[in-house]
Amino acid sequence: MEYTPKYIRKTLKKTISEISSNPQSFSKNPEKDFSRTRKLPFEKVVNSVLSMSCKDLKCEIMDIFEFDKNLPSVSAFVQQRNKISSNAFETIFKNFTSSFTKQKLYKGWRLLAVDGSDLHTPTNKNEIASFYPGSNGQKPYNLMHLNALYDIMNNLYVDAIVQPSHNSNEHKAFVSMVDRDISTLPTIYIADRGYESYNNLAHIQEKGQFFLIRIKDTTANGISSSLTLPESAEFDVSVVLNLTRKQTNQTKKDKNLKFVPHNCNFDYLPTHCKKAIPVKPYSLSLRLVRIEISENKYELLITNLKPEDFSPTDLKQLYSMRWGIETSFRTLTYTLGLVYFHSKKEEYITQEIFAKLTMYNFTELITSHVVIRQKNRKHHYKVNFSASVHICRSFFSGNISPSLVEALISKYVVPIRQSVSNPRKMNSKTAVCFLYRVA
């Protein structure tokens, strides 16, 4: 079926209504919270958080209640919001996204990129798990870490885990997202070097799925360091690694066995085992491919995709598609406003992160069906996502009719400039202080 703007909004509203029909399951005090009729019921608070932009809280409330003289105070809104647990917004995000089963595939494969991103949040020394006091004259700050799975072909976030920075663990988050992925479609998980881990590969293998990960090339602490690889600049070799916790003289001599230290997390071997008790090694079937990404510059990829299905050229193209999650993080940060939080508390911040992820998917689902007329110009054009977010947010709030949405989005386009590359800026964007918001 065709996903029209009206259907997409109806689906999101239905998802919110289903959650709101049982507020006790998503309230901190089920017996007390939202038990009385108030100016700000559960559903209204949820809709308000989803429709927030980059203004300060009092201006957001004015916009949401359309300058009604009886609009609630900032204090009243915060008190009602405090009753809602953050998993309400996570549930809305997941249920809404999973409602759209019609997906674009890459030659029959679902492509999921995984990555993490640090989010600067308003400074709050009381949130110990995310607080950094600063050093060498640096101001104190707080960091939250967003781990996400991103559907490259459909430009949608399909899962996410938010962690305070001091407690963040990308490997653990990745394994959790892989294990709870219930899709039966053949899936390729694409990741950068930070996800090089036997445990990650094993979890994907146990799901019967596939991976494509860039790994460290011939370094002392990488997977490739223990393997005998060709000396040629480019190669494509298959190996079988048998992982074991035992380090005996016999295992040292066997080149097919790879010792996994006890302090290294691996879920498919016992942490400790006696030498006298035989333990069957865990087998990983791997393929290592070194490709040239630019002149005299090479990268090493590890995968379990078969050579007859994906050549080295295909793998190179697949890995380059991972960049989609990087650009989506930039859109989340600057366009959706993940530097314009409306609280210092980690729980409220987590609410807003999942709210922004939901609105990102809401906007993508609508704009993906907008047809841009390609006139006789130098460049092809695509929708301006920044303008689309503003239009879709107003559409969600009921300020724009369904018949106007696509027409408005198609009016704002930007050129697609091929083969344009800029140096990556590594400076992070800090949270915008509450005092410096637009009116």
Image (cartoon, helix red, strand yellow):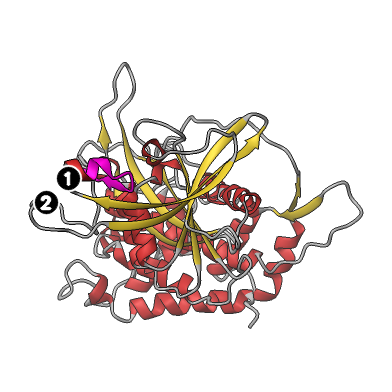
- The residue furthest top is 136
Q: Mark 2 or mark 1, which has the lower sequence index?
A: 1
Judged left or right of residue 149, residue 91 is left
The answer to whether one can see residue 162 in this image is no
Which quadrant would residue 117 be assigned to in this image? top left
| Mark 1: amino acid | His
Spot occupied by residue 224 in the image (x, y as percentages of width and height): 41, 39
Q: Residues within 10 Å of mark 1 (few under 14, many from 20)?
A: some
Give yes or no for residue 261 being in the magenta stretch. Answer: yes
Disc 1 is placed on an element classified as: loop
Which quadrant would residue 430 be assigned to in this image? top left
Quarter of the image for the N terminus: give it: bottom right
Judged left or right of residue 43, residue 236 is right
| Inter-mark Cα distance, 2 to 1 | 7 Å
Residues at circles 2 and 1 in contact by the CB criterion of under 8 Å: yes
The answer to whether one can see residue 342 in this image is yes
Q: Residue at x 39, y 45 (%)?
A: 196
| Residue placed under numbered mark 2 in the picture | 272
| Residue placed under numbered mark 1 in the picture | 262
Spot occupied by residue 325 in the image (x, y as percentages of width and height): 53, 51
| Residue numbers of the magenta segment | 251-262
Judged left or right of residue 308, residue 219 is left
Choose between 7 and 185: the one closer to the eye. 185
Disc 2 is placed on an element classified as: loop
| Mark 2: amino acid | His
